[in-house]
Image (cartoon, rainbow, N blue to C red):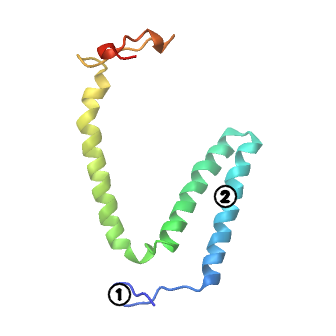
Amino acid sequence: MAANHTGKSHSHSASYYVKVWAVLLVLFVISVCGPMLEIRSVTLITAFGIAVVKALLVASEFMHLRGEKKYILYMLMTMLFLMFILYFGVAPDVGTGGGQNWIRIPLEGASSIPAHGGHQ
């Protein structure tokens, strides 16, 4: 029996995991049937909303992250901080669209781009 850092047991019976699997299966069916209605907003809600719910369910139940909330918050905040540093570090260069290393590809066809170094 596994124990987390607080000493509490977090093992579940096989029927518990079967129930979680059944919920994931139902959410999967809903996310597959959503685009069949051909309503864009329903498709977006089922595609992204259910994907987030499924990811949270898998992370909390199968990866046992429910008991590690403090550490997850630290990791999430660190990841967001590093992502913003990366984004704002490269955004001024990428946003300009100019410079010596930028090649404008014509929209009508990419076949007019000359081969670099003689390679096809």
- Asked whether the viewer can see residue 107, the reply is no
Amino acid at the residue labelled 2:
Phe
For label 2, the SS is helix
User: In which image quadrant can residue 74 be found?
Assistant: bottom left
Vertical order, 24 against 102 (above or below): below
Q: Give the position of the C terminus as an image quadrant.
A: top left
Vertical order, 24 against 42 (above or below): below
Residue at 66 percent of width and 44 percent of height: 43
- Picture disc at residue 32: none
User: In which image quadrant can residue 104 be found?
Assistant: top left
Q: Which residue is mark 1?
A: 6
Vertical order, 12 against 48 (above or below): below
Q: Which residue is mark 2?
A: 28
Which of these two is toward me, 25 or 66? 25
State the separation of the CA atoms marked 2 and 1: 34 Å
Q: Give the position of the N terminus as an image quadrant.
A: bottom left
Q: Residue furthest right?
A: 37
Vertical order, 115 against 24 (above or below): above
Category of crowding for the residue at label 2, using alpha-carbon neighbours closer than 10 angstroms: few (below 14), some (14–19), many (at least 20): some
Amino acid at the residue labelled 1:
Thr
Category of crowding for the residue at label 1, using alpha-carbon neighbours closer than 10 angstroms: few (below 14), some (14–19), many (at least 20): few
